[in-house]
Amino acid sequence: MIDVFVRAAGLIGLPRSIGEIYGLLFCAKTALSFDELVERLQISKGSVSQGLKVLRQLGAVKLHYVPGSRRDHYLPELSMKRLVRGFIKDQFEPHLSSGSQRLQGLDALIQAEPDAELRTHAMGRLNTLLTWQQRTRKLIPVVMAVLGGTPFAPGESSEEETVV
Amino acid sequence: MIDVFVRAAGLIGLPRSIGEIYGLLFCAKTALSFDELVERLQISKGSVSQGLKVLRQLGAVKLHYVPGSRRDHYLPELSMKRLVRGFIKDQFEPHLSSGSQRLQGLDALIQAEPDAELRTHAMGRLNTLLTWQQRTRKLIPVVMAVLGGTPFAPGESSEEETVV
DNA sequence: CATTTTGTTCAAGTTTTTATGAACAAGCTA
DNA sequence: TAGCTTGTTCATAAAAACTTGAACAAAATG
């Protein structure tokens, strides 16, 4: 089963070790401690430490206090909506906004182009890019709405919300 | 401007050279030939050949016949909808269906688990995964609809469809 | 048919990414 | 405070991904 997550991690550009960590937590019946991860996955402390750091940042794992133990214990986030939100906020949005800035810089460059024909063509292409960006921005709330269990096409879904 | 595409390529897990090739085609005012790409990007023939192969497979570039020239000329696909559709069909769907198969295999494994308590827990987690998969499948048509220029939330969009 | 042009393939080299583990910090415990 | 336990950092090693270029195929040209 862990293999499923290793592949999923690869798909979204995360290293194998992170897929393994989340996968093991997902499978486990109880919260696991740092060194249980090290031992059961047979990977180094360094990898686990850095992997958990990323997963915490993404909101994909949560610290879970275990009475009587000094060790950190972790539980996986099981809500797809929250997982996707974390991923978008952390890995996607930054690209979108830096993209906006770059496009503004391009606009300035294009205005400085003397050749009118070239300038017109460049402006057309820049507009295409701007349109793409707008659409991508519009997409995010739609995606979240679908994952939130609110069927978007009314009268088409009969899904039950088990894990919110 | 090419830099924008190099970054976008990185975001979806494609090598730099592919971003450069598509970027240059996107900027160009006319179709470019194989060796124009090699010369203007200063990358090897091998990279251009393989890059174009991937881009053709994705439907991100089209061969364009130029009278009087034996060389292949290429034009970029400018429709975001088609670009996204190509990406999903080529890079995403395969993962989804192989994922389905793996999940079925897991189901078989879980049924063979003797410990009833463990089995119950595993079935629950497997169900979560199946739910995630269903939702992902539902997402694709919704995404395509938004990109198709059909506003999904009526009375909210005033976008013009210039490039279909 | 020999030659040239055009593009592909693939083994080897380069670069980038990921994993390792030893050294280090932080905070308990006694 | 000395001595544990727990987890982080970071230089280096290992692995993976990407690029190159020379050899090769395919097809047009003369």
Image: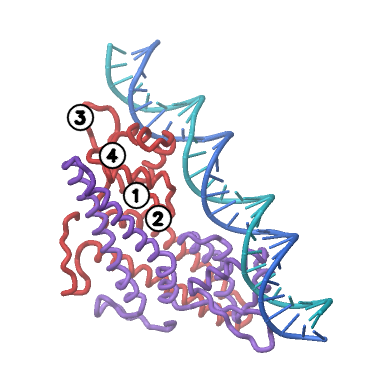
Chain colours: A red, B purple, C cyan, D blue
Q: Residue at x 38, y 69 (%)?
A: A136
Q: Are marks 3 and 2 in contact (CB under 8 Å)?
A: no
Q: Are marks 1 and 2 in contact (CB under 8 Å)?
A: yes
Would you identify the image quadrant in which residue A153 lies? bottom left
Which mark sits nearer the N-terminus, 3 or 4? 3
Which amino acid type corresponds to the residue marked 4 in the rendered image?
A: Tyr
Name the residue tied to disc 4. Answer: A74
Which amino acid type corresponds to the residue marked 3 in the rendered image?
A: Pro
Q: Quadrant of the C terminus of chain B?
A: bottom left
SS for dot 2: helix
Q: Which mark is residue A112?
A: none
The location of residue B163, given as percent across then percent down, is 44, 82
Asked if residue C7 is positioned above or below residue A11 in the image, the reply reads: below
Mark 1 is surrounded, within 10 Å at the Cα level, by few (under 14), some (14 to 19) or many (20 or more) other residues, namely many
User: What's the distance in space between the residues labelled 1 and 2, CA to CA?
Assistant: 9 Å
SS for dot 3: loop
Q: Are marks 1 and 3 on the same chain?
A: yes
Mark 3 is surrounded, within 10 Å at the Cα level, by few (under 14), some (14 to 19) or many (20 or more) other residues, namely few
Name the residue tied to disc 1. Answer: A58
The chain under label 4 reads: A
Mark 2 is surrounded, within 10 Å at the Cα level, by few (under 14), some (14 to 19) or many (20 or more) other residues, namely some
Which mark sits nearer the N-terminus, 3 or 2? 3
Which amino acid type corresponds to the residue marked 1 in the rendered image?
A: Leu
The chain under label 1 reads: A
In the image as oriented, which residue stretches furthest toward the bottom? B67
